[in-house]
Structure formats: structure tokens, C-alpha cells
Image (tube, rainbow, N blue to C red):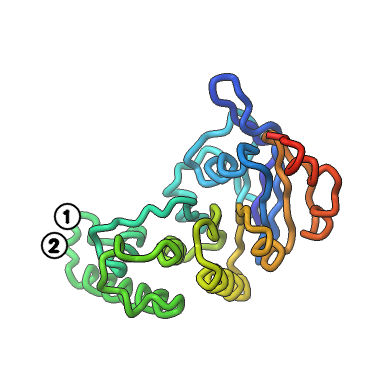
């Protein structure tokens, strides 16, 4: 479904990614692991459109998206969450989801007046969808609370909920378990499994090896901005090169 071929990215002459490849099958959960500084988040930023690669190509469902801006990738079904939650703290939990919806008629001032019936219908549909998503992840009772009042784990769930408002085909998750309590980590993992069973594809950057082992169908290991190895979780953690990358200081 998603294919990354020969992607490289440099900053000031320093290579953050060097001829990286990634092949993500539809309906799979693909994990990316590696030591700090190995290029994992940089790769998500390139796939998501926040950064342009210096070389290589990215294809989604066999269509080249390498040069597309973030919003066009979102329209094609690719979205992401961030390692540090970026909630709109002054808005309610429900409002955080409503602003994520793309291509709403009411975004145009002229259309908001000229097509009032359409605007009202779309707003009702968006509220209904947001409510269903919040109920699914256990945040509905907090729908009217300001987003800044959520716990760290709840903010991670909110990030995922906003991604779901875009009707995604594939979601990039950057460390969904970081700073999250074990019970909330289990909740997040269960939501991801449930969505995968419905056909949503995931790419997950994560340091929590227990989560990676429990969720991922395949795992790519990065070191020094390039592919080190890939395979099942058991295959990669049994690889001597992976042990050296984590314990031997490869960056």
C-alpha cells in the first residue's frame, strides 16, 4: 500500500536518511525501531509531507505522492500523529475533532451563507462522527472538557481520534506509547488492533518493545539513517546487528 524507495534527506550536509526503503502492505501494522537519532521521525516527516526528500520516491496505492503537500496526502487517506501531542488546548475535546475535518462547505464565508442547509447538514454529520469516535476510545464523557485538561495518555488518544476524522487509509504513529501509563498504553494498543481489523494500515515508530512485539506484523530496524534489517519482531531482535545498534552506540 505504501512504498518508500531510496529516500534520502540531509540537513546541512549531514545525512539523516540514506537510501531508505519501506514496503507497507495494506491492513498491516509496520513498526520502525532503532536508537535515538537513527532517522525514524525524519522518515515519518518525509512520508507525511512535512519534509521533502533530497532523493527517492514515495508511493501510496501505486500513485507517486513524493511532491504532494500535507493536505493532499490527507485527502488521499494518509495522516499522522506526533510524538508530542499538539492538541488545541483552549478548544473542547469534541471541537478538536471537528476542526480536523477536511473540505467542509462552511470553510468558505460565501458558501456558509449561500449554502446554509449544506453547512448545517455537514456540521451534524461531523458532530455525529466525532461523537462515535470519542465513544469508541472512551473519551466521550470528556467531550465538553478543554483538551488541555486531558492526561498525557488521553491526549495521545485525542491525536488518534483527530486522525480518524479524516477517514484515513493509513496512519503514521510517532511513539504512541511515549510517556503513557501501562493501562493507557494497553488501551491505545487495543484501539490500534481494532482499527487494523477494519482495514486501517499503520506505520508505528516506537521505543516500547513490548508494544512493538504485541502489535506489529513486520518491523524495520534503522541505524545511522539507513535500513539495518527487517522481518518479524522475533527475527529482528535475534539479529546480532540489532543488538549492536542498541547496545553498541550506533547513531
Residue 72: % across, % down: 45, 49
Residue 79's disc is none
Which of the image's four quarters has the C terminus? Answer: top right
Which of the image's four quarters has the N terminus? Answer: bottom right
Find disc 1 in the rendering and name its residue.
109
Mark 2 surroundings: few (<14), some (14-19) or many (≥20) residues within 10 A:
few
Residue 158: % across, % down: 40, 65
SS class, disc 1 = helix
Q: Is residue 126 above or below residue 38?
A: below
Give the CA separation, mark 1 to mark 2: 7 Å
Residue 230: % across, % down: 78, 50
- Front residue of this view, candidates 64 and 146: 146
Residue 113's disc is 2
Image-based side of 44 in relation to 62, left or right: left
Q: How many marks do you count on the picture? A: 2
Image-based side of 80 in relation to 245, left or right: left
The residue sitting at the left extreme is 113
Q: Is residue 249 above or below residue 12?
A: below
SS class, disc 2 = helix
CB under 8 Å between discs 1 and 2: yes
| Residue under the point 16% across and 55% down | 110
Residue 103 visible, this orientation: yes
| Residue under the point 19% across and 59% down | 111
- Front residue of this view, candidates 9 and 40: 40
- Front residue of this view, candidates 129 and 175: 175
Amino acid at each position: 500500500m505504501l512504498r518508500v524507495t531510496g529516500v534520502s534527506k540531509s540537513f546541512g550536509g549531514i545525512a539523516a536518511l540514506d537510501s531508505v526503503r519501506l514496503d507497507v502492505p495494506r491492513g498491516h501494522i509496520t513498526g520502525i525501531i532503532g536508537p535515538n537519532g537513527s532517522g525514524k521521525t525524519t522518515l515519518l516527516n518525509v512520508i507525511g509531507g512535512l519534509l521533502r526528500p533530497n532523493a527517492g520516491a514515495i508511493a501510496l496505492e501505486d500513485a507517486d505522492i513524493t511532491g504532494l503537500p500535507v493536505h493532499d496526502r490527507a485527502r488521499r487517506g494518509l495522516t499522522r500523529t506526533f510524538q508530542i501531542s499538539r492538541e488545541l488546548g483552549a478548544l473542547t475535546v469534541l471541537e478538536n475533532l471537528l476542526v480536523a475535518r477536511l473540505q467542509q462547505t462552511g470553510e468558505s464565508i460565501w458558501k456558509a451563507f449561500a449554502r446554509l442547509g449544506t453547512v448545517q447538514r455537514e456540521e451534524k454529520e461531523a458532530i455525529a462522527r466525532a461523537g462515535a469516535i470519542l465513544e469508541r476510545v472512551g473519551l466521550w464523557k470528556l467531550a465538553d472538557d478543554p483538551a488541555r485538561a486531558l492526561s498525557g495518555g488521553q491526549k495521545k488518544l485525542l491525536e488518534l481520534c483527530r486522525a480518524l476524522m479524516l477517514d484515513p487509509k493509513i496512519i503514521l504513529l510517532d511513539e504512541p506509547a511515549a510517556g503513557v501509563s501501562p493501562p493507557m498504553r494497553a488501551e491505545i494498543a487495543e484501539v490500534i488492533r481494532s482499527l487494523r481489523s477494519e482495514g486501517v494500515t499503520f506505520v508505528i515508530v516506537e521505543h516500547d518493545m513490548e508494544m512493538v512485539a504485541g502489535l506489529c506484523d513486520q518491523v524495520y530496524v534503522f541505524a545511522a539513517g539507513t535500513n539495518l534489517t527487517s522481518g518479524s519482531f522475533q527475527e529482528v531482535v535475534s539479529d546480532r546487528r540489532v543488538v549492536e545498534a542498541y547496545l553498541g552506540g550506533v547513531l
